[in-house]
């Protein structure tokens, strides 16, 4: 099984001592198969937000997408495992700003 679903470009912005309070946030967009209702997307959102690296998460069952904002790095494998734990299939992950 390939361990890279394509979301590996990590952007690191330079930090300065003055701006240590500025957190580096990264967004990742996922395509997710298997969500059918708001209960599904809500379950995925909760599981994603339970990950320590995740600042916030959103899931849209109608569009079949989910998005996470990260406060620290998170691998595509960890996202995949979380989506599967929620009962869905992770189709793709890409960095989104
Ligand atoms: Cu559902």
Image: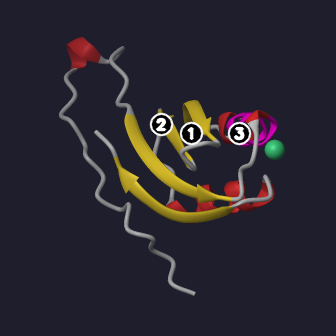
Identified at 68% across, 56% down, the residue is 83
Relative side of 63 to 5, left or right: right
Q: Does 11 lie within the magenta span?
A: no
* Percent of width and height locating residue 82: 70, 54
Q: Position of residue 71 (x, y in %)?
A: 47, 33
**Quadrant of the picture in which ligand 1 is shown:** top right
| Mark 2 lies within 8 Å of ligand 1 (Cβ measured) | no
Q: Pinpoint residue 52: horizontal percent, then vertical percent.
A: 64, 37
Secondary structure category for the residue under label 3:
helix
Vertically, is 85 above or below 44? Answer: below
Q: Disc 3, disc 1: CB below 8 Å?
A: no
SS category of the residue bearing label 2: strand
Magenta extent: 39-46
Residue 59 lies, in percent from the top left, at: 60, 38
Q: On the image, numbered disc 1 is attached to which residue?
A: 53
Whether label 1 lies within 8 Å of ligand 1 gets the answer no
Compare residues 22 and 80 and report the one nearer the observer: 80
> Within 10 angstroms of label 2, few (less than 14), some, or many (20 or more) residues?
many
Q: Earlier in the sequence, mark 2 or mark 3?
A: 3
């Amino acid at each position: 099984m390939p361990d890279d679903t394509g979301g590996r470009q990590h952007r690191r912005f330079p930090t300065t001592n003055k701006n240590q309070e500025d957190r580096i946030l990264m967004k990742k967009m996922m395509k997710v198969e298997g969500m059918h209702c708001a209960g599904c997307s809500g379950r995925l959102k909760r599981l994603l937000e339970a990950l320590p690296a995740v600042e916030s998460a959103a899931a849209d069952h109608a569009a079949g997408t989910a998005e996470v904002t990260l406060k620290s790095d998170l691998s595509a494998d960890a996202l995949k495992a979380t989506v599967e734990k929620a009962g869905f299939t992770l189709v793709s992950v890409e960095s989104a700003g």
